[in-house]
Image (tube, rainbow, N blue to C red):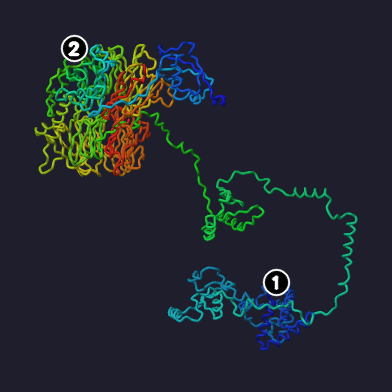
Amino acid sequence: MDEPMNDAPGAQVKVTFTTNEADLQLPEEKRQLLVPADIRRYGLSRILNSDLMLDSGSIPFDFLVNGSFLRSSLEDYLNSEGLSLETNLTLQYVRSLIPPVFEASFEHDDWVSSVDVLTSTSPAGRWSGDNFSRGQERILSASYDGLLRIWNASGEVLVTSPSASHGGHSASIKAAKFISSSQLASTGMDRSIRVWKYTDSGASGQAELKPTLELYGHRASVDSLEVDGPSKRILTASADGSVGLWSTSKSTSPEADPSLLPNAHTSKRRKITSSITTPQRGPLFLMQIHNAPATAAVFDPRDRTVGYSISQDHTVKTLDLTTGSVVANLTLSHSLLSLCAIPRSGGAPLLAVGTSARHITLVDPRASAATTSVMTLRGHTNKVVTLAANPENEYSLVSGSHDGTCRIWDLRSIRPASGGETEGGMGNVSEPVYVFERESRAGKKKTVAGEGAKVFGVVWDKELGILSGGEDKKVQVNRGRDVVKE
Amino acid sequence: MKSKPVEKKRKARDEESDSESDDELGNGLFDGVLEASEDEEDYIPSDEIDDGDSESEASEGSEDTEEEDDDALLSDDIPSDVEGDDEMGKLSKGAEELEITEPGVDPKPKHQEEEHRNYRIEKDANGGERYIYDEIDPVYDSDDSDAQGPVNTIGDIPLSFYDSYPHIGYDINGKKIMRPATGDALQSLLDTIEVPKGWTGLTDVNTGNPLNLTQEELELVRRVQHGLVPDEGYDPYPDTVEWFTSKQETMPLSAAPEPKRRFLPSKNEAKQVMKLVRAIREGRILPYKPPEEREREEEEKEEVQFDLWQDEEPAAPNPMHIPAPKLPPPGYEMSYNPPEEYLPTKEEREEWEKTDPEDREKEFLPQKYNSLRKVPAWGTLVKERFERCMDLYLAPRVRKNRLNIDPNSLLPKLPSPAELKPFPTVVQTIFRGHEGTVRSVAIDPVSFPCSNICMTNADHQQTGVALATGGSDGTVRVWELLTGRQVWSVRLSSEDPVYAVRWRPTKDAFILAASAGEDVFLMVPTHSSVTPTLDQASRDVLAAGFGYATNGQQPAAAPGKEPAGKWARPGTKLEDAGVLVRVTVRSAVKVITWHRRGDHFATVSPEGQRSSVAIHTLSKHLTQIPFRKLHGLAQTVVFHPLKPLFFVATMRTVRCYDLQKVELVKIVQPGAKWISSLDIHSGGDHLIVGSYDRRLLWHDLDLSNRPHKTMRFHPKAIRAVRYHKGGLPLFADTSDDGTLQIFYGKVPNDQLESPTIVPVKQLKGHKVVNQVGVVDIDWHPREPWCVSAGADGTARLWM
């Protein structure tokens, strides 16, 4: 390497711009460029956005060099990698991820176990189609005090679910989801899944939440719930190791097993009598497929007749929801706690699985896949209990963990696993792009094991951003809509 | 013999002097005789000199006589010294002898004897003259050694040999020497009372008479005893007589003038000198050696220097040879010109000078000289060398056998912890809520190996979701394991801590047992896993015994005797909370252990004396005390996971009882002073024992009663030990130092192999409160997770 050349003010590096994004392709002749050696991401981004190049206005770009994001000047990168300035660098430019900014916190009375949103771009909003009135974003939060709360975007509680004596949950709620703009489902430690009718009469009107259906079948706490609006199906995973498929309509549901109903036996225990009688139904399928608590089950984002379930018995199972049978079985090396399906353009989705071993494993569920464990995402210091994919693209996701942080991952930034990091994961390894902590803990000392700051639920919405609920009794909103700008 | 005649002569003279009163006169006579006959040249000024001369003269003369004497001896074998022997003299009086001895006598003494005759002349048998001499008195000075010669010839044997004979021996002629007449007993008694002068109490060997010493002999003995010269008059240190001195006499011995030859050059010398001069002139003598010759000589000289050890072969050092330790190499301070920092300050110098030389740390003070030329001689060189020699000489050198072994090679080959994953490494959930110490933890339910069978039940209840804890605040709490959410709580007692909580290990019911004080409570906690059916089933299990009791099938307790356990309902308040049965035993219960089938559970109340161990039957509401008496304080009990065996740990030993045959099977002696906890491997053949004296002991029950391995990893007492019961080869202990130690403990399938035990992780995090650290531990039934209960009021999930 020619040292004096490095120090020369006018040192230049020859770069080649590439991209995978079809709408941002550069003309062939413009791809090669000489840039100053001390240029950084911002400068490169401005060059790309300039009239001569893409003429795209002001899209922030990030640049991947050999699979990792460029975080310093080109010169520093070359020096750290021990490369010569004459090297022709290939820069893959991608739309930039913008750090999520804290926006708001919604205070609860108890731990928040799950969050969901209803916006025009959320699944429920899309499913409800015309019925959904735009501009009325709603946030649903499920809490350990057994209540569901629906908030508007400015942080006001519009409606709270009734208590146990009025048809509400008799124990903590572990999961809740909007099915449509007028319907939602919740489940929790009282083993029942409840379908609610939600009526929202505009910004000032009286919002109302009425239980319409109680579904019984699980024998232990139901920890996860997924809904599919069009087919009116609910997919649940319970600590008794079973995965249930339920219908939201009373008519299509079979009768419930009477022994599982809350008043099946008259015991001396204090009876919870509900003043409202709600129809009680059973599951379409109850698949007793796991040897340990099933922790999550999701629908395939494309094919709603296919589901995936994970369990603490280390398995990922692919389910055929039309027959209620297991199609494929995948065994990993740790207890699995959270699951989300990242749609991929070509066929089967990629499953992101959060484990008790503090990492996220990306799994290709196809039986034909050569490697089942595609990538390992490391960085959390505690159990990864919730995952949400970016609704806008196929390469980023957010994870929430008991360590009190949410981490945003970009699957494009990868590097091969080195020898020492083979523990618990295979394939490539990635580090988080952004980490954000609970705003309520800001400035306080970090607690051991994320005590008081555990994140239990996270959701990523195109409009509202990243919402997370946790042990700090808050739903925290972080701006996520610019994280990956269109 | 040689000087005998001389002596004889002197004796004779002494005799003579004795006989004569006038010494001077006698001497004068002698002198005259001697002078006349001997050397005329010597002038003898004094009597003494004369004496000496006469002696020498006499000795000269005696030479002749001696020769003659010898001849006589050769010619005749009869000894000549008959004169000394008085007895002999008496016995044998051969004339020839006397004839022979006569020539030995000097003519001069003879002449002398003319005047002092010490003999008389008699006629012998032939009519010739015969000289009869007087008896010679052998005075002390006498050389007559024969005079006292032994007469008894029996030799050196005890005289007692002759006690039975009338004689005591034989004389030289073979005649018996008769025993002298001894007085009777009275006489001997009188003799012993009146000790005669010189009495010794000894018997003369030669004569058989009592040996008495004369006054002179006693004096002699006394002098010898006192180390004095035996002769009284002898002066060993007489004043020196200076015969020849440097004193210039007024009258020289000779007044002859110096001879002429003293003033003339020596012709002989001149001759010698001329010889040398001639040699020098001719060049035969050179003032210096020619160089070539000198070189040659030097070479020769060098050649002459031979190597003393040239033939010595280098032999291997003697195995016992210990080389002297080397002196330490000199440091900078020993330099003649050391750097300034080594030079002593004034205070140091004063202190050094003040201290006693023996107490000084250094033998010397560093001193600075500008050049080597200014360095004086080293004053204490000899002393130093001497002390070094003394060190080498006096210091014992012992050969130590040092084993040249790499210490690492002695360590057992253990796999690295990274290969033994998974095991818990970090705390992941903290369960906070108890006030005061968390005494006990249990994850729902403890899964015994039979749980695999139970899994096939229609009721697919999953385990490992609920954590129960009991604390010093008297509450039992149930938590969601992963999130740390408390889902149920009940206060069993306001005073007594909850010492133990244990889940019933079967899945047909969801029952938790907890102890507070003397009470054991059985409860059905409200939990998400408790479906109405399960709840009902659990209540039925608990209530079944009440009917049994009322049916009167329970063996009636002896009248007037307190029953071992009273089973009752705890009251509506607790019953509403889910606590359904209370069993009251005689003293505070510290340990609860369930049998794998869930119908029996054992409790231990260490202060309970005879009733410290109780076995309760749930289905009959029956409490039994299996042991009439226990050897020591019962600490903990455990059921064998497969066989009807029951292990009771007292302070020192673990006893294994067969519950069916009701007999003692085995006594395990861990060697700990105070056992705190005990757990059995799910295979049933291995036991771990924790003790308050910081030891963790692994027992192979098939192998020995002694520990297979003893481990000491904690600086404080071990509180609890626990095996992983779900198939993972893990076990852990908890200690008062606030840590947990996780071990990998693989029990091989092959009976012959010994288990692999590797400490893999020490888990820190609990705070130590009042010297109490981590109190209890439980493993997750499937996963490598464990929950610990600490004195800091928290339970922690490690994964």
For label 1, the crowd category at 10 Å Cα-Cα, with few meaning under 14, some 14 to 19 and many 20 or more, is some
Which residue occupies the extreme left position in the image?
Answer: B551
Percent position of residue A10, x then y:
54, 22
Q: Which mark is residue A252?
A: 2
Residue drawn at x 89%, y 67% as measured from the top left: B267
Considering only vertical position in the picture, is B486 above or below B27?
above
Percent position of residue B212, x then y:
52, 78
Considering only vertical position in the picture, is A258 above or below B780?
above
Q: Quadrant of residue B19?
A: bottom right
Q: Between A340 and A41, which is closer to the camera in this rendering?
A: A41
Query: What kind of element bears circle 2?
Result: loop
The residue singled out by tag 1 in the image is B73
Q: Is residue A86 left or right of residue A72?
A: right
Q: Mark 1 and mark 2 in contact (Cβ < 8 Å)?
A: no
Give the amino acid at mark 2. Answer: Thr
Q: Between B720 and A485, which is closer to the camera in this rendering?
A: A485
Q: Between A357 and B204, which is closer to the camera in this rendering?
A: A357
The answer for which chain carries disc 2 is A
Percent position of residue B4, x then y:
68, 75
Residues behind callouts 2 and 1 on a single chain: no
Q: Between A384 and A116, which is closer to the camera in this rendering?
A: A116
Q: Quadrant of residue B39?
A: bottom right
